[in-house]
Amino acid sequence: MEKLKMNIQHVYKFVTEDEILKQGTNALACNRALHDGSRPGNDFLGWVNLPSSITEDAIKEIEDAAVNLRTRCDVVVIVGIGGSYLGARAVIDSLSNAFDWLQQDRKSPVIMYAGNNISEDYLFELKEYLKNKSFGIINISKSGTTTEPALAFRILKELLEEKVGKGEARQRIVAITDATKGALRMLASKEGYKTFVIPDDVGGRYSVLTPVGLLPIAVAGINIRKLVAGAVAMEKATADNISFEYNLSAIYAVIRNELYKRGKKIEILVNYHPKLHYFAEWWKQLYGESEGKDHKGIFPAAVDFTTDLHSMGQWIQEGERTIFETVISIAQPDKKLEIPSDKEDLDGLNYLSGKRVDEVNKMAELGTRIAHVDGGVPNLLIEIPRLDEESIGQLIYFFEKACGISGYLLGVNPFNQPGVEAYKKNMFALLEKPGYEQETAAIKAKL
Ligand code: PA5
């Protein structure tokens, strides 16, 4: 398997090699804590050895459920939010043909998403789209009580049952939730849906390699065995017996914390391929929810280049110097497209004729990196061999491991998210949910 690489030459102007190496012992202690569970959040460390512990039976069960949905449905709606949504979408978007869903003769169902917002227009339009489609639903919620997916599921379930009847609907709905607790578990047992369990010790944002991510990914026709194999390779490469100089997750975690100490409060994840847009959304949740607490933490942002060079490029080049960039670079494109020559050359592009489009993209990438470093923006580069299952598997685990180490270096519990509850409490109070009478009175007094 070709390996993920990291290039840190463009951070040395801002943090020296010595300063990075000095933090090695500290970072390895944090990595060890992820393995021995000796720090806060140790009840959510199931993801650490997850890739290597996925059994053949577990993979087979997921593949069988995927085949059932692929056989019965032209469209599968993934209902979920946050960690119960972003991992699947990150991988599916990264590894799917961007225009396949528009083709009549495609081999896999169209994947749609719901339950990640409460927009009436979105749900209405999705319902309209699904009316004439043969569709199924994967309903994902660890707690089984999250409002956004529960609401979307209620609406889509009604539509599906009206269309195909309760019996067939039962064959087209899969629930992924807690083993025993929550409204979704109760509903699934009562209705007789096929279910998968989200392990207790794996939090939402670390759950992409559980059925939460693997089932939707398999339904989309992506090879989950190769994805897991990539993650296993990175699990080994960042294990607690690996020295600091070779542990890329530990090095990345140290660099971002050292930059943070030097006033670089915002990390921008950069990609040069639109397919990686949702990978960055997944990464934003992973780091934002893990580190943004106790009034500290790097703000994770993301841009799609070169698109955003024509919008955010100005700010990055010359705005406040509180940022650094982490670029995800893809060594080899999957497809080949050469720039044709043109007899008249009216657009003046003949100097590029015969070159591949990716050569132009790579020069944009290199030129931008140099310009941004010259402009005072530290720059890390993470290179994956290509956009395939093994590379994405490596990248997922690389970032997960680095996030755990980085959170511990920062001195926070990277595995809780107490701040997410505040908006829910207010929303329930405003909606006058039974049991929230006191909160309703309190919030109304503030209006
Ligand atoms: O990472 C997390 O824990 C959150 O983003 C959750 O995944 C999200 O809030 C959805 O929760 P649930 O799966 O319980 O519906």
Image (cartoon, helix red, strand yellow):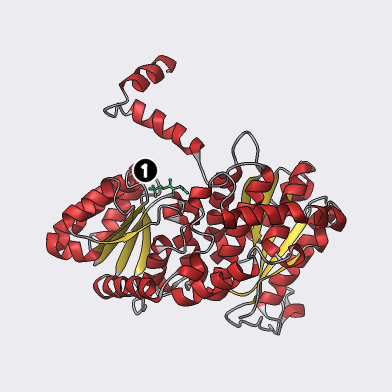
Give the quarter of the image for residue 159.
bottom left
Q: In this view, does 124 lie above or below 424?
A: below
> Residue extending furthest top?
445
Which residue is at 24% across, 67% downward? 134
Rendered-image quadrant of the C terminus: top left
Q: In this view, does 68 lie above or below 248?
A: below
- Residue 209's spot in the image, x, y percent? 46, 64
Relative side of 32 to 428, left or right: right
Query: In the picture, which quadrant includes the N terminus?
Result: bottom right
- Name the residue: 35% across, 30% down: 428
Q: Crowding near pointer 1: few (<14 within 10 Å), some, many (20+)?
A: some
CB of mark 1 near ligand 1 (< 8 Å): no
Q: Where is residue 142 in the image (x, y as percent from the top left)?
A: 37, 51
Query: Mark 1 belongs to which amino acid?
Result: Ile
| Figure quadrant of residue 147 | top left
For the point 62% across and 53% down, which residue is it?
33
Does 77 sit above or below residue 99?
A: above
Total marks placed? 1
- Percent across and percent down for residue 388 are 54, 75
Q: In which quarter of the image is residue 157?
A: bottom left
Q: Can residue 318 be seen in this view?
A: yes
Horizontal and vertical percent for residue 30? 66, 52
**Residue 26 vs residue 434: left or right?**
right
Residue at mark 1: 118
Side of 173 where 33 appears, left or right? right
Q: Can residue 223 be seen in this view?
A: no
Could you say which is closer to the camera, residue 251 or residue 266?
Answer: 251
Q: Regarding mark 1 in the picture, which secondary structure is present there?
A: loop
